[in-house]
Image: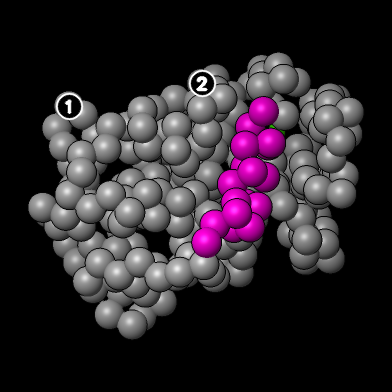
Amino acid sequence: MKKVLVLEDEANIRSFIVINLRRAGYDVIEAASGEEALEKLAAEPGTGVALLDIMLPGIDGFEVCRRIRASNSRIGIIMLTARSQEMDKVTGLMTGADDYVTKPFSPAELTARVDALFRRAGGGQEEEAGVIVREPFTLNTRNRTLEKNGQRIKLTQVEYSIIKYFMENPGRALSREEILDTVWGKDYFGELKIVDVNIRRLRLKIEDNVQSPVYLTTVWGYGYKWGL
Ligand code: CA
C-alpha cells in the first residue's frame, strides 16, 4: 500500500487528515513532533509522501523538510501552512518541499495533492529509458539523474520533471500554465507561483550565476525557456 507520513501536533487536525487519507486508500504513519517524524521515516524508508505542519514544538516543519531532503530526494513533501503564512510557503518550497496546502483544506483537495505527488513519484515506469544531452548537462531518464560536466546534481522529483520538460523542448518558450499542467498534472489545484519558486530553486542548483541565468531563462510575462 502507498505510505504517507502525517506530521501535525494538533491531534484533531491530525486525525482529520489521517482518517481522510485512510479513506482514500493510503497507509498512514502519524507523528506529533518533527523528531518523531524523522524517526518514523527512518524506520519506514518506503514512505512515498510526507505532509509536514510548520509550527511545531521542538524542530519546526522547515527543519524537518531540510533534514529529510539531506538524505532523500525521492519522497514527495507537502507543507501544511496557515493562511497568514504567505512567506512560509515560499520558505518551505526553498527548503525542498514539492507543494503546500493552506489550512483549512477540504479532504478532496488534500487527497488530490497527495495523489498528484504519488503519480509523479511513480512516473518512472512508463518513461522510456534514455539519455538527453544538452551541454553541459546530461539527463538520464532511466535512473532520473542529472549531471553537469559529469558532476551529479541532486534533484527532487518535481525538479527532475521540470528540467526534463525543458531539456525535451530546448529553445521553446514554455508558459507557466504549460509547465504546471505537465509537471503537476491537469487536475492540480495549486497556484502558478509554485512554478516560479521551483524554477528559482532549480537555478540555484544548475546555473553558474543565478543573477543572470543562461540555462533556465525567463520569458517576460509568459514563462521560461531552456537556453538564451
Ligand atoms: Ca502546529
The answer to whether 41 is drawn above or below residue 173 in the figure is: below
Q: Amino acid at mark 1?
A: Gly
Q: Specify the amino acid type for callout 2.
A: Ser
- Give the residue displayed 24% in from the left and 34% down from the top: 223
Labels 1 and 2: the sequence-earlier one: 2
Q: Position of residue 146 (x, y in %)?
A: 40, 69
Label ID, residue 47: none
Q: Residues within 10 Å of mark 1 (few under 14, many from 20)?
A: few
User: Residue 151, image x and y in percent?
Assistant: 36, 80
Between 3 and 103, which is closer to the camera in this rendering?
Answer: 3
Relative to residue 112, is residue 140 drawn left or right? left
- Which residue is under mark 2? 84
Which residue is painted at 62% across and 37% down in the image? Answer: 116
Residue 102 lies in what quarter of the image? top right
How far separated are the C-alphas under marks 1 and 2? 27 Å
Residue numbers of the magenta segment: 112-128
Quarter of the rendered structure image containing ligand 1: top right
Vertical relation: 161 (above or below) 197? below
Q: What residue lies at 44% left-to-right and 25% top-to-bottom?
A: 191
Extreme residue toward the front, this view: 128
Residue 122 highlighted magenta (yes or no) = yes
Residue 170: x and y, percent? Answer: 23, 53
Q: Which residue is mark 1?
A: 221
> Is the CB of the residue bearing disc 2 within 8 angstroms of ligand 1?
no
Residue 49 visible in the current orientation: yes
User: Residue at left 54%, top 47%?
Assistant: 97
Q: Categorize mark 2 by other alpha carbons within 10 Å: few (<14), some (14-19), many (20+).
A: few
